[in-house]
Amino acid sequence: MRAVAVVPGNKDSLHVRGDVPEPAPGAGEAVVRVLEAGVCGTDVEIHQGLYGAAPGGSPYLVLGHENLGVVDSAPAGAAVAVGDLVVATVRRPCDEPCRPCAADQNDMCLTGRFKERGIGGLHGFMSERYSEDPRYLVRVPYSLREVAVLLEPMTIVQKGIEQALRIQERMAWDPRKAVVIGAGPVGILAAAALRLRGYEVTVAALEPEGTFKDRLLDEAGIDYVSTGRTPLADLEAKLGRVDLVFEATGSAHVVLRAMQLLGPAGVCILSSVTGGSKNLEVDVATWNREMVLGNRLVFGTVNAARRHFESGVADMAAAEERLPGWLGKLITRRLPFTDAPRALERSPEDVKTVLQFA
Ligand code: BGC
């Protein structure tokens, strides 16, 4: 069958190949026909040779972790049935397994020896079909068919917010203001999820005001600030106390500013993976003093558990009900998967590019 693949560690290696073996489902596994796969920053990093690992013994890695498909075959009595619309989770537990992996919390793996489909050690979903254990398949209603390929990035958001709210149970808290930094798919989905929870949300990003993303956010009652006009350092003066910051830019410089934006007892969610290394001069005494005297909290979050896929489905359904068609506007380009190399060329107005397989 055909698939979009890369040779991890090799720069610019993305290609379409026709010699990928058909899935060989193990006992109890389902076969899924891929409908769509989203292209994300992690895929670009893998294509650039900076990240990723092929499965043992394979010279290539089938790319893709943002996915949507239809069940083609499933064993009798499985949790999914033929015809179900499904999204697969990304991470699989480490072999030991560590305590979180043993408790179905492989998104919190302690050993780092987990595998991730389409990223590290397991083929991904940019192929015509794949097989999977149904416990890693999450059913999605057909009413979300046009947008469900956005579910995986939405789960990153769901986990970050869920963890923040759980941690903040440390105090009596009535959060009102949230700032999301970055207007890529994760940033925009984070803003939407926070708005659904009643926050006053401001997205801060590089693009000028009045452009597509600003207008899109405005439709959802979300403010937009261009950091070209209002640097992050001035945002607190403009907005007042910020209770929650969601960092989703991938820029080391911004990560530092994100923490500094946080009001007393606020929580800062770091969700972007910054590549390479970047040295910055930091006044650690001031940073530490403000963290301590303000009971501030910063934490990192990666990947997501099954429950975040389920809450993501609920949020996407709620967004569709409140603003029908809005989520779909985040998919700014759909291309046949045979044009995969073109999917990597991005314009500033692009939010999410999706490859179509069927
Ligand atoms: C994916 C996560 C994954 C992370 C690190 C992200 O792009 O959405 O599922 O855990 O990359 O590999």
Image: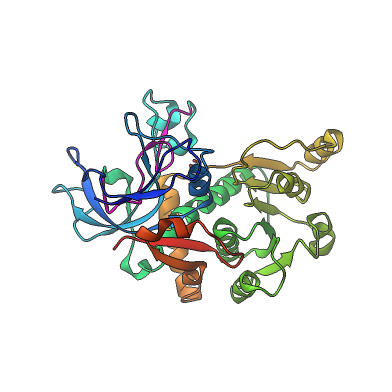
Q: Is 36 situated left or right of 287 in this image?
A: left
| In the image, farthest residue toward the left | 76
Q: Position of residue 228 (x, y in %)?
A: 78, 62
Tell me how the rendering is colored. rainbow
Q: Is residue 212 visible?
A: yes
Q: Name above or below for residue 299 compared with residue 38.
A: above
Q: Position of residue 177 (x, y in %)?
A: 70, 60
Tag count = 0
Please give the name of the residue rendered at 46% of the width and 76% of the height, measured from the top-left corner. 324
Please give the name of the residue rendered at 63% of the width and 45% of the height, measured from the top-left corner. 270
Q: Is residue 127 magenta?
A: yes
Q: Viewer-proximal residue, 346 or 72?
A: 346
Q: Name above or below for residue 183 compared with residue 221.
A: above
Q: Main secondary structure of the magenta part?
A: loop
* Image quadrant where one finds the C terminus: bottom left
Q: Is 65 situated left or right of 180 in this image?
A: left
Q: Is residue 79 visible?
A: no
Residue interval drawn in magenta? 112-131
Please give the name of the residue rendered at 40% of the width and 65% of the height, measured from the top-left corner. 335
Q: Position of residue 181 (x, y in %)?
A: 67, 56
| In the image, farthest residue toward the top | 96
Q: Position of residue 99 (x, y in %)?
A: 43, 27
